[in-house]
């Protein structure tokens, strides 16, 4: 049976090395959940984060204008489904809209068939420790060149510049991608 390398236990360990070793494998170890109970539905008040590939697919499927540029708790820029009212804008980790995700309509997810990884694995699974590393894993992935290129491409087409903070805008454009 295939196993993941031991996860770093503290800040001194090399998370970048762990990411490099496990890229592609980590996500395959997470069990998806199809539960539609009230508790799981409430999770859609917070939008689910996804991989670079998942956000690229949403853009290809015509949902680019319903994403937002997000700066997470690790100060990493990434794309994710938008909170209602923040489509094609910038948000930070502390903003949570009471109406939830732009794709949450009538008690179900409009993009359930292509829902980002965080939404697919949320639920009543016993993989709490393994899932707890997902935000960091996604942050490491979005810091890679592929993620930076996707953000720059999305920003050129969809981002509402007026709401963008100058420092974040400069970070987004300083990449030579």
Image: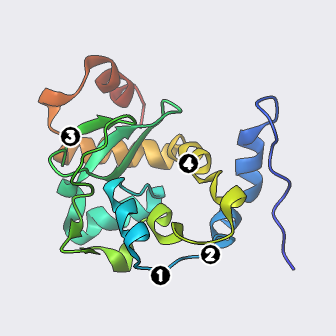
Comparing marks 4 and 1, which lies closer to the viewer?
Answer: 1
Disc on the earlier residue, 1 or 3: 1
| Separation of marks 4 and 1 at Cα, in angstroms | 20 Å
Image coordinates of residue 126 in percent, x first then y, are 68, 69
Comparing marks 2 and 3, which lies closer to the viewer?
Answer: 2
Give the camera-side residue of 144 and 127: 127
| Separation of marks 3 and 4 at Cα, in angstroms | 21 Å
Which residue is disc 4 drawn over?
135
Toward which corner of the image does residue 91 lie, by quadrant?
Answer: top left
| Separation of marks 2 and 4 at Cα, in angstroms | 16 Å
| Separation of marks 2 and 3 at Cα, in angstroms | 31 Å
| Residue 170 in view (yes/no) | yes
Whether label 1 touches label 3, CB < 8 Å: no
Q: Looking at the figure, which quarter contains the C terminus? A: top left
**Left or right, 26 with reference to 47:** right
| Separation of marks 1 and 3 at Cα, in angstroms | 30 Å
Which residue is disc 2 drawn over?
31
Which residue is disc 1 drawn over?
34
Pointer 2 local density, CA inside 10 Å: few below 14, some 14–19, many at least 20: some
Pointer 4 local density, CA inside 10 Å: few below 14, some 14–19, many at least 20: some
**Residue 151 sits above or below residue 162 on the image:** below
Secondary element under disc 3, as helix, strand or loop, is: loop
Which residue is disc 3 drawn over?
89
Comparing marks 1 and 3, which lies closer to the viewer?
Answer: 1
Secondary element under disc 4, as helix, strand or loop, is: helix
Disc on the earlier residue, 2 or 4: 2
Residue with the most extreme front position:
38
Give the camera-side residue of 155 and 32: 32
């Amino acid at each position: 049976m295939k196993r993941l390398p031991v996860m770093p236990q503290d800040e001194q360990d090399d998370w970048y090395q762990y990411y490099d070793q496990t890229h592609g494998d980590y996500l395959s170890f997470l069990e998806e959940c199809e539960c539609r109970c009230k508790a799981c539905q409430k999770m859609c008040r917070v939008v689910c984060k996804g991989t670079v590939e998942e956000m690229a697919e949403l853009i290809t499927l015509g949902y680019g204008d319903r994403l937002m540029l997000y700066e997470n708790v690790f100060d990493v820029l990434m794309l994710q489904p938008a909170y209602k009212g923040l489509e094609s804008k910038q948000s930070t980790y502390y903003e949570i809209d009471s109406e939830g995700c732009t794709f949450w309509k009538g008690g179900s997810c409009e993009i359930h068939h292509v829902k980002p990884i965080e939404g697919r694995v949320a639920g009543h699974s016993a993989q709490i420790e393994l899932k707890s590393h997902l935000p960091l894993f996604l942050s490491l992935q979005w810091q890679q060149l592929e993620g930076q290129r996707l953000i720059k491409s999305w920003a050129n087409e969809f981002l509402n510049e007026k709401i963008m903070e100058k420092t974040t805008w400069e970070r987004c454009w300083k990449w030579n991608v």
